Amino acid sequence: SFSWFDFERSQTPPAPSAPAPQPAPKETPAPARTAVDSVETLCKTLSALRQALNTAIPADLLKAFTPPGEGSALLQKAISQGRIDQWEAPESGVLCVSLRAERMYGKITPIPLRTGVAERAAQLYALTRIPHYSLQEPTRAAWKRAIKERLGLTSRETKNLLNRLFALSLLQPGDLRRLHLTLERVLAFLQS
């Protein structure tokens, strides 16, 4: 006798159809940097600057390492988290920052600030803002105009500063849209 099960076995299986196209796997974007990452990076940068310069660190110098418009907010976040202290240098009135771990007996101990570091830090902070607020087109001439305008330097001082930026690779001929900040380049700028 022939049953239903025998019928199924006697049938040839259908030819496999072409596999359905699988959607391309979506690339997972890199996780956005969180404020915690940014605060941690800010603290590491501050620590490296303190070790290298052995002087008080102006707040403007630390803010130069942050994206435009985010420096003050990020610094305030680090202060509110208890990671960084902000204080005024007694001899010059310049706002400085230090790690909370550098406190002595639970109190902020102002560290002497070298005037050369303070002046160059203010210059560097102003220079990092030029591409975002003053630069019409990324050319050497536009940088020269913006530096002269923004820092109030003479033509000769402007030319010397621009040449120094190129010599230290803070500005690079192939990419004049921004300053190329690294800790080593910034330290060379501050100490030159």
Image (tube, helix red, strand yellow):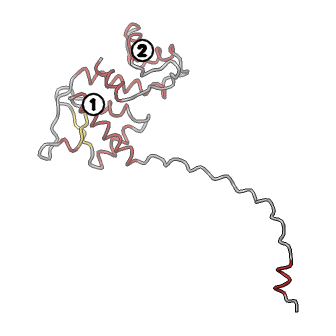
Residue 58 numbered mark, or none: 1
Foreground: 158 or 179?
Answer: 179
User: Is 184 left or right of 2, judged from the image as shown?
Assistant: left
Nearer to us of marks 2 and 1 is 2
Q: Picture coordinates of residue 41 (x, y %)?
A: 35, 41
Residue type at numbered disc 2: Leu
Relative to 13, is 117 above or below? above
Foreground: 189 or 18?
Answer: 18
Quadrant of the drawing holding the C terminus: top left
| C-alpha distance separating marks 2 and 1 | 23 Å
Q: Secondary structure at mark 2?
A: helix
Q: Which residue shows up at 51% across the image and 16% down it? A: 142
Q: Earlier in the sequence, mark 2 or mark 1?
A: 1
Determine which quarter of the picture holds residue 128: top left
Foreground: 146 or 13?
Answer: 13
Residue furthest toward the top? 156
Q: Picture coordinates of residue 96 (x, y %)?
A: 25, 33
**Total marks drawn?**
2
Relative to 7, is 51 above or below? above
How dense is the environment of label 2, judged by Cα within 10 Å: few (below 14), some, or many (20 and up)?
A: some
| Callouts 2 and 1 close, C-beta under 8 Å | no
Identify residue for label 2.
162
Q: Picture coordinates of residue 113 (x, y %)?
A: 20, 27
Residue furthest toward the left? 105
Residue type at numbered disc 1: Pro
Relative to 163, is 134 above or below? below
How dense is the environment of label 1, judged by Cα within 10 Å: few (below 14), some, or many (20 and up)?
A: many
Determine which quarter of the picture holds residue 127: top left
Q: Picture coordinates of residue 24 (x, y %)?
A: 67, 52
User: Is 43 left or right of 55, judged from the image as shown?
Assistant: right
